Amino acid sequence: MAQHRDSARESILTAFQELIIGTSGSGASLDAVAKAAGVTKGGLLYHFGSRDGLESALIDRLETLAGLEYERMRMAPQGAAAYYVSLAEYVNSPLDRAMLAGGTLARGNPRARSVVVEMRRRYFDILNADLNDAELARATMLLTDGLYYDATTIGTPFDDELDIPAFLARVLPRARP
């Protein structure tokens, strides 16, 4: 019975997350979430109590997924910077979906905003520790943001003269102590 409860809870939370992403938050009413999750509104409220409960659980999900990612990044055999650049290709991964929803919530939810800001700071700190160069760490973040933007909008890599992954592969090893 507990497994069914957890499954229903995750289904509701995922439905909420996807509605936040798909409607920029405006279409994520409790009724819409219940319908998308295939549960009654009473079932939704049993698991989360309110929209605030849904938002809090979604932010918790984002924090959990980000925490796992920080550890993978720190332990990556190719180095944290190369690993971080590869994240640009993880479009529609669980972390990507949680980040998109969390970013939308961050516009009006102070806790979500705090988590998103903290994520950027933690990524920067891990990159800076790996590269031993704050400016290169920031440039790596900005370049990766551009790669992610391209992956989500046009879905094709840069032209050869703008091949940022190849550029970073050449530059990042030189930055290490």
Image (spheres, rainbow, N blue to C red):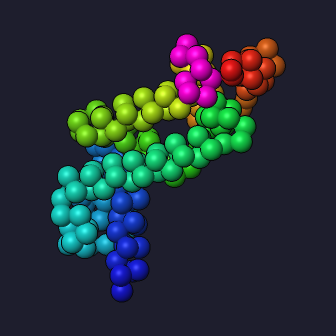
In-image side of 104 versus 48 (left or right): right
In-image side of 132 versus 162 (left or right): left
Residue 25: % across, % down: 31, 43
Image quadrant occupied by the N terminus: bottom left
Task: Determine whether 155 is above or below 133 in the image.
Answer: below
The residue at the far bottom in this view is: 1
For image coordinates 20% across by 67% down, the residue present is 45
Instruction: Write the start and end of the magenta stretch as one range.
Output: 128-135
The residue at the far right in this view is: 160
Residue 108: % across, % down: 23, 35
Q: Disc count in the image?
A: 0
Q: Is 130 colored magenta in this rendering?
A: yes
Residue 163 visible in the current orientation: no
For image coordinates 56% across by 49% down, the residue present is 93
Residue 86: % across, % down: 66, 37
For image coordinates 62% across by 23% down, the residue present is 131
Task: Determine whether 23 is above or below 58 in the image.
Answer: above
